[in-house]
């Protein structure tokens, strides 16, 4: 379960697994806004205040803001579902 004010893990997974080519302009824009706001929330929330599940979710989705490709992005790209 994600922490209060954070994007749910289910929403993140659903968005990540649907190829961008199958998304409309508004869906892509919405995903971008949600991802950016969740990334900002991750940065602002101290590690010590995050639940264990949120820490794991941030690690999986690479919400540490270090410009590293996330495990999810690597998987999408390997499957040909990503932007790269």
Image (spheres, rainbow, N blue to C red):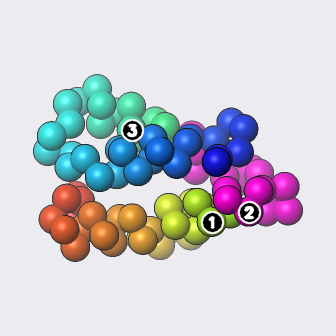
For the C terminus, the quadrant is bottom left
Mark 1 vs mark 3: in front: 1
Q: Position of residue 32 (x, y in %)?
A: 40, 40
Residue plotted at (28% across, 26% down): 26
**Left or right, 10 with reference to 76:** right
The answer for how far apart the CA atoms under marks 2 and 1 are is 6 Å
**Left or right, 56 with reference to 68:** right
Residue carrying label 1: 56
Q: Position of residue 7 (x, y in %)?
A: 56, 41
Q: Residue furthest top?
A: 26
Q: Given contact means CB atoms under 8 Å apart, are the residues at marks 2 and 1 in contact? A: yes
Residue plotted at (15% across, 65% down): 80
> In the rendered structure, which disc, 1 or 3, sits on the residue that comes first in sequence?
3
Establish if 19 lies above or below 79: above
Q: Residue furthest front?
A: 1
Considering the numbered disc 2 on the image, is that residue within a helix, a strand or a loop? helix
Circle 3 crowding by C-alpha within 10 Å: few under 14, some 14–19, many from 20: some
Establish if 68 lies above or below 34: below
Q: Position of residue 3 (x, y in %)?
A: 71, 45
Q: Mark on residue 39? A: none
Residue carrying label 2: 52
Q: Which residues are magenta?
A: 36-54
Secondary structure mostly seen in magenta is: helix
Residue carrying label 3: 31
Q: Is residue 53 a member of the stretch shown in magenta?
A: yes
Q: Is residue 68 among what the camera can see?
A: yes
Q: Is residue 84 a member of the stretch shown in magenta?
A: no
Judging depth in this view, the residue of 19 and 64 nearest the camera is 19
The answer for how far apart the CA atoms under marks 2 and 3 are is 24 Å
């Amino acid at each position: 379960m994600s922490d209060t004010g954070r994007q749910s893990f289910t929403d993140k997974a659903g968005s990540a697994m649907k190829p961008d080519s199958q998304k409309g302009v508004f869906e892509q824009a919405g995903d971008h806004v949600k991802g950016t706001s969740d990334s900002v929330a991750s940065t602002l929330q101290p590690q010590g205040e995050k639940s264990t599940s949120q820490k794991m979710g941030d690690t999986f989705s690479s919400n540490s803001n270090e410009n590293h490709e996330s495990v999810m992005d690597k998987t999408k790209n390997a499957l040909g579902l990503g932007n790269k």
